[in-house]
Amino acid sequence: MKYEVFATYDQMCRRAANLISAQIILKEDAVVGLATGSTPLGIYNTLADWYAKSDLDFSRVRTVNLDEYCGLPFEDPQSYHYFMQTNLFSKINIKPSNTHLPNGLAPDIREECKRYDALINSLGGIDIQLLGIGHNGHIGFNEPSDTFSKDTTHIQLTEDTIRANSRFFKSPSDVPRSALTMGMRSIMCSRKIILVANGKEKEEIIHQAMEGPITPRLPASILQLHPDTTVLFTIE
Ligand code: F6R
């Protein structure tokens, strides 16, 4: 794993945006794996800026998101569909049909998990995957557990994650209790991975993920086995 530390959040976001744009310039129809949460916001703003300046073209890019809450309509401002639409897709020239997220409202959740894995395979896998990291070491919504989940899964969110994500909701009781998340196989088969984190409170978990034992109790630790992962960190 490569590790880069930045003095400011802006610098970290520019570096992540640079790595993503390099991939898109190299391969116009790249498959880009995307994350939500607060950390990628500056990256999406930077990509949208570069698109506005005609430095980037998303017309052939395909995207797959890591996760989505169960039970939230797409137009709910807390849904990840809404997040991606508002913070990135509406600001660039990506085709809506080229953007993909798991459907947390699917009537048959098991079928939806299978559909999502088949979709990622049909796109030829992920060229570059952007990840954040939870305080408990989750990536996507792959929560600490006894085993790594290989495939897209319906997951019960831990109390830690519900508490952390309640900052986006009116009250903790509004946070959905479950979500669909891409599994470790698709993440680990991504040809390149960028993990971004900011804030002093993420420093220890990043350190454990990079240097500690590889264990499903700290899902991000599996990235030690990936051949091309870059961790970008700032404590700003
Ligand atoms: C969301 C996701 C999560 C977040 C993580 C960190 O799509 O994949 O794993 O990346 O919870 O969230 P922030 O960036 O808000 O600290």
Image (spheres, rainbow, N blue to C red):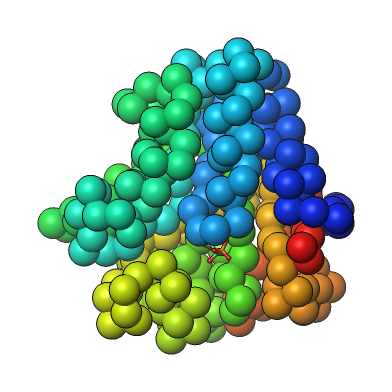
Residue 121 appearing in the image? no
Query: Residue 9 versus residue 26: which sits nearer the camera?
Result: 9
Q: Looking at the image, which residue sits at the far bottom?
A: 159
- Numbered circles on residues, count: 0
| Position in image of residue 80 (x %, y %) | 37, 52
Residue 130 appearing in the image? yes
Left/right placement of residue 138 relative to residue 210 reads: left
| Position in image of residue 44 (x %, y %) | 56, 40
Q: Looking at the image, which residue sits at the far top?
A: 54
Which quadrant, please, contains the C terminus? Answer: bottom right
Left/right placement of residue 34 relative to residue 83 reads: right
Q: Which residue is drawn at 63% across and 24% down?
A: 50
Q: Which residue is drawn at 67% across and 27% down?
A: 21
Q: Residue at x 70, y 73 (%)?
A: 202
Q: Quadrant of residue 67?
A: bottom left
Vertical order, 62 against 219 (above or below): above
Q: In which quarter of the image is residue 196?
A: bottom right
Left/right placement of residue 134 relative to residue 110 reads: right
Which quadrant, please, contains the N terminus? Answer: bottom right
| Position in image of residue 43 (x %, y %) | 62, 42
Vertical order, 156 against 22 (above or below): below
Q: Which residue is drawn at 45% across and 20% down?
A: 93
Q: In which quarter of the image is ligand 1?
A: bottom right
